[in-house]
Amino acid sequence: MLSPNHAWNLPLRTIVLSIAFLTLAISSASAQLVGRANVIDTDTFTIGGQTLRLFGVDGVEFHQFCYVDGEAWACGAAATRAFQVLLDPVVVSCEPTGARIGDIAIAVCTSEEGDIAEIMVRQGWAFADQAQSENYRSAEEDAREGAEGVWRGVVAEPWAFRADIAAIERRYIDRMLAQLPLDAEQILVRDGGRVPVFTGFDLAVGVTTEESVSREILIAGLPDGFLEAAIPDRGVFDWRLPALALADLRQMILAEIERVAVQSIIAELGQRPGTLVEVVDSQTYYEAILASAAGLLAEARQPVLMVASERLPEWIAGWFSGSPPEGADIVRKDEIIDPNYLGTVDGIDVFVGGTPESDSYLFPADMLLSVTYSSEAGNAVDIAFAAADDPSIFVIRFDQSIQWLADAVVTIRYPYEPPPGAYEN
């Protein structure tokens, strides 16, 4: 049984009739619902805004396929259309049993043609749900013997079909999960660890030191039914859609692992011993970075300036858009390919990074010695379900050991510039 989001696209005539002949009568004493029905799938419909499901039967799922003489047949779509034909011209009367599935009321429903559930079973479009009732068992046997509806071919019980879909979804996710630790390891150690602000450091997967820090990431997985979402309204399954959904999830997980790993290195940089220099404007800022970098340049060590990404100072943006400080030498190194790289000011590489809003860090590019990743399983990371029986949340864990040279980090703090309108009501 599909959710209302998967409802069949009804013809305009049906919609108009459903609106024009909404509930004719509602008896408050018996909670009886009477009116025109708007079909959702093979055993579910609405009357006057209330969603109802037929008691005692389980309709063929809308997206099910049957096989007749070895050929696939969209029997679920055919069953839905048969239900529409049955209910479209008539007034339906329903007695809710009191049982509910979420917002859906289970009900015994009739029309001028008789018991609607029995008709659907007898026509071969629904199965008797003997866990609810024995009333429709003989009707199912008659339909089977007469090769009515789905019984003209090979069909799976709808409850077995739903269980198969859930099992297939879990196998898809399990397969991706088994490959992810290797993919994550390749991401973490590729291209210099995606930290181009540093040069010459070692990246490894192995045993971390006692100073290592544990990282944990929680990521929402795919919702139940993502395979069903790959089945458009006309019931033609497109395998590319779940494959794309899984590929997008994989990329999201790997990107988040990489982001956390890189930002953790930058965060540790800000905690290294150092000195603080406070400035008041762009001129004193420029003088401060030149003075802080002078010793490194004299030693032929590459200085790096990392500035706040959330609030890039206007004067720094201006340096790289045609308004550099007087006498400054602005260069961009083509060999540094990174979206956070701005260029070089008087030999100082400038990057936008995850520093506090009004801080800049100046440090030598060779300050980072090594980064080692490890997990309990011996991979770079462990990736598992947050709960073993719940694939909706992934938990990612890894230890990160970072080794530094003893150089001091110079923090250059400038006046904070609140964004326009930050204090407006």
Image (spheres, helix red, strand yellow):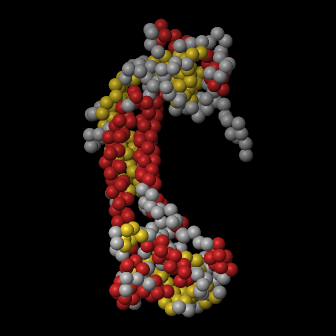
Which residue is at the front of the view, 21 or 424?
Answer: 21
Q: Is residue 15 above or below residue 247?
A: below
Compared across the picture, whether 160 is left or right of 290 comes to left
Q: Is residue 413 left or right of residue 55?
A: right
Residue 115 in the image: x percent, y percent? 49, 90
The answer to which of 289 and 304 lies nearer the viewer is: 304
**Residue at position x 59%, y 21% in the image:** 278
Q: Residue furthest top?
A: 298
> In this picture, is 153 found above or below 373?
below
Q: Residue furthest front?
A: 69
Query: How far from the left and from the top, in percent, is residue 117?
Result: 46, 85
Q: Nearer the viewer, residue 399 or 19?
A: 19
Q: Position of residue 194 (x, y in %)?
A: 43, 30
Q: Is residue 226 visible?
A: no
Position of 319 with respect to 338 (left or right) is: right
One can see residue 336 in this view:
yes
Residue at (67%, 19%) from the top-left corner? 322
Image coordinates for residue 106, horizontal then vertical, percent: 48, 81
Q: Name which residue lies at 42% across and 75% down.
A: 60
| Count of labels in the image | 0
In this picture, residue 207 sits left or right of residue 263: left
- Which quadrant of the figure has residue 268? top left
Q: Residue, x 61% and y 16% (percent of image)?
A: 286
